[in-house]
Amino acid sequence: MARRVTFSRNLTLSLSRSCQCYCKYCAFSTHQAHLHTPDEVEAIIDGAARRNVKELLVLTGEKPEVNPLVARRLVEYGHEDFTAYVVWACERALERGLLPHTNLGVLDRRDLGRLREVTASQGLMLESISERLMETVHAGSPTKHPQVRLQTIKDAGALRIPFTSGILVGIGETEEERVASLEALAAVHAEYGHIQEIILQNFVPHDRYYGRDVGAIADESARAYWRTGVADGRPELPLPSWATPVTVADMKRLVQETRRLMPDVGIQIPPNLADWWDELLAAGATDLGGLSANGDHISPEHPFPSPHQVRKRLQRDGIALTERLCVYPQYIDQEWMSQGVLDVVKLKYWSFIPRRGSGRTDPPFAINRELVGPAIEKGRDGKALSEHELTALFAETRPEAVQEIREAADELRAELAGDLVTFVVNRNINISNVCTVGCAFCGFGQGRRSPDAYQHDEAEFVQRIHDALDYGATELCIQSGIHPDWEFDEYLRWLRVAKRVAPEIHLHAYSPMEIAHMQDISGGLPLSEIFARLRDAGLGSTPGTAAEVLHDGVRERISPNKLPVARWVEVIEASHNAGLRSTSTVMFGHIEEPWELAEHMRVIRELQERTGGITEFVPLSFIPFQTLLGRTHGVEEISREDNLKHTAVFRLALGRTIRNVQASWVKMGLESATEALRWGVNDLGGTLMEESISRLAGSQHGTKLDPDQLVAAAHAAGRPAAERTTLYELRRRYEIPAAA
C-alpha cells in the first residue's frame, strides 16, 4: 500500500442533466429539460467557496442542447451553445478561487479547446471498449460508442489537457474486455502522456429518480453521513439481467492491471460504492476521488465518506490522506494549463506546485544560472556566497551542475573533517507531546485533552535513562512540546533528575522555542540567567532545533505561533555566551523557496562567525505524511536526488565556519544517509533509541540504529568510523577491515 492516499476536496455542479443517451445503468440523466439558471449557478459556486473546497466538478448529460427547451434557454441566457455556458460558469468559479474540472461527455476538439482556457482538468470515462454493449446497456446512445469516446480522449491529449478517464465494471462486459479497455487507454496515454488518473468504478443498481432532483438527494445523503457517520440509506437493489456481478477479487485484478499498464498514472477507487476500498488501496490504488461536499450526483443515495472519516480509517494502517488539486502536480505548468488558470493556482494553491528548482512563486529577483559555476568555486574555497549565488545553487537542476556541486562539497568536507565518519550513542526522550503551538508541519504535538496526549512521570523518565545507560549512551537529547502547565522549575527538575541518575551523561536539551517559553513564564528573567540556571541544573548543550527555515515569511506560513527569526538567534547566541555550545538545523523540502533557504544559511553563517558556538549543521528533510502541511497543502516528500543536492549546497553555504554536517538517517533513511557521505556529510548523527517527532510525521526509517549499523554504513562508503561525544571528542575508532 502507498504511504499516502490522495483526494480532491470538491463540490459538484450538475449544470444540466438533460442527455441524448439512454444508458440502462444511469440514474443521472433525464430527457426532460434541465438547466440551472445563472443565478442558481452563482449561488452554488458561492456556496462552494464558503465551504473552502478547491475543485468545482461540473457534470452534465451528453449534449443537453439537443433538448429544444434547453437550447432556447441557452439563447435567453446569452450563450451561443452549451459549451459557452459551461465556460461562463467556469469563469465564475475561477473568480472565486475554485478550479473547474469538467465532465461533459463526448466533445469535439473545438469545444475541448474552449474549455481548456477555463479548466484545470477535464474528464471522460471510456466506460468500455466493447462494441457489443452498444446493443445492450448502450443501445440508443451514439456517443457511448468506444471509438467515439476514444477520439475525444485522443483529442484532449493532442491539446495537452490533463485528463481523467476510466472504466465501468459490471455493466455486462467480460473480464477480457475490462483489460482490453485498460489497454486502449494505456495506448492513448503512451502517445500523449495526458491521462493523470484512471477511475475503476464498479456498477451499483440505482432507482430511476423520475421527477426527483438527484442533486438534492445527494446533498441530503452526504450531510447526514458526514454528521452522523452512518450511511444506512443506501438502496440494496437486485442486479439487472444485463449486469455482471463484481467481486473485490475482480477489482483487485483491475488495480494490478492498471498499475502494470500505466505505472505513472493515479488509480482512483470511489469509496462510496463498496466497503472494499481500503482493500483496493492495499492492492495498489492511490486515490479516492472527489469526496464531494454535496454528495455523489451519479449515485445520489451512496454518499461519500467525509475526509475525516476516511482519515481515521486509514490511520489504523499508518496511511496519510492528502488533499490534491483536480489537476495532478506533474501537469501544473504552462505546457498543460492556460495562464489564467495557472494564475489562480499560483495565487491560491501555490504550495501544490511541485518543486522544480526555480521556485513555485515569483522570486524577488531573477535566478541566474550563470552564477552557479563561479558560486561552486567560491563555496569550495570557503568564501561567503551571496543571496543570488545561493539561490541559484538551491534552484539548480542540471545533472552536470549538480555533480559539480557534489564534488565541491565533498572536497570541502575532506579538507575540514577528513574521511572519518562520526556518530554519537544517544537516546531521545520526549517527556511530553502536549503542545500549544500548533505547527502545520508537526505530527507530534497534541492538545492537552487529546486522547493521544501523554506526559511521562518521573519513574518512566528514570527508567528511560537507565535503558540509555545500559545501552552505552553518552548523551540524552531531551525535548518536548510547549506544555501549558509547566513552570520554569519543571524544566530545571527534569535536568536535575537526569543528573542524579546519570551524573556523567551529557544533557543536550530544550529547543530555542522551549527556552523562549521558559523566559516568558519566568517573570522576565534575562536569557543569561535562564541559561545560568539551566547550566547549574545540568544542561550541557542546546539543540538548534525549532529553526525550520529562518525566514519570517516561511515561518508565518507554516507556524505563525513559533518564535520569530530574531528571537531564535537571540536564544542561540545567549546559549553560546553562557558557554553552552549548540547545534543548528534546517527543515527543508516543504513550501520554502530557494531564496528563503539562502536567507536561512546567511543567518546561520553570520551567527557562527560572531560566536563560533555551533558544533554541527543538521539538514532535516520534511516528512509530510501525517502532518497538516502535508495533508492540506499537497506537499510531497522531497526526492532522494533533491535531498542530496540540498545537503551539498548546505555544506558549500557554510564554508569553513561549521566543520560538521550531519545526515539524518531517521529522515532520509540509512541508505540515503550513506550516500550523503559523498555529498559533503561527515557525521551520521545518533543512535536515538527512541524517536517520536519524525515517526509521528510518517517517517518509516525506524527509531533506533545500533552503533555497528552506523559503522557499517561508514565502511560501505569506504570511510573509517568513530564514536564521538556530543561535543565531537572521539571515544573509539572503527577502521575499515583489512579485507575490505
Image (cartoon, rainbow, N blue to C red):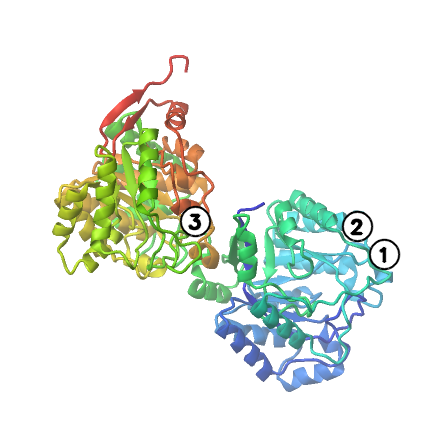
**The N terminus: image quadrant:** top right
Hey, what amino acid is under mark 2? Glu
Q: Earlier in the sequence, mark 1 or mark 3?
A: 1
501 versus 200 height, above or below: above
Classed neighbour count for the residue bearing mark 1: other residues with Cα under 10 Å, few (<14), some (14–19), many (≥20): some
Residue 542 visible to an observer of this rendering: no
Residue at x 71% of width, y 45% of height: 253
Quadrant in the picture for residue 694: top left
Q: Position of residue 576 (x, y in %)?
A: 16, 44
22 versus 701 height, above or below: below
Please state if 380 lies on the left or on the right of 30 as rendered.
Answer: left
Q: Earlier in the sequence, mark 2 or mark 3?
A: 2
Hey, what amino acid is under mark 1? Arg
Name the residue tied to disc 3.
Answer: 697
Disc 1 from disc 2: Cα separation: 10 Å
Please state if 335 lies on the left or on the right of 274 as rendered.
Answer: left
Label 2: state its secondary structure: helix
Q: Position of residue 605 (x, y in %)?
A: 22, 44
Q: Position of residue 633 (x, y in %)?
A: 45, 58
Name the residue tied to disc 2.
Answer: 177
Classed neighbour count for the residue bearing mark 2: other residues with Cα under 10 Å, few (<14), some (14–19), many (≥20): some
Name the residue tied to disc 1.
Answer: 132
Circles 1 and 2, Cβ within 8 Å, touching? The answer is yes
**The C terminus: image quadrant:** top left
139 versus 431 height, above or below: below
Depth check, front residue: 267 or 732: 732
Q: Earlier in the sequence, mark 1 or mark 2?
A: 1
Residue at x 62% of width, y 44% of height: 263
Camera-near label (2 vs 3) is: 3
Disc 1 from disc 3: Cα separation: 50 Å
Depth check, front residue: 465 or 596: 465
Label 3: state its secondary structure: helix
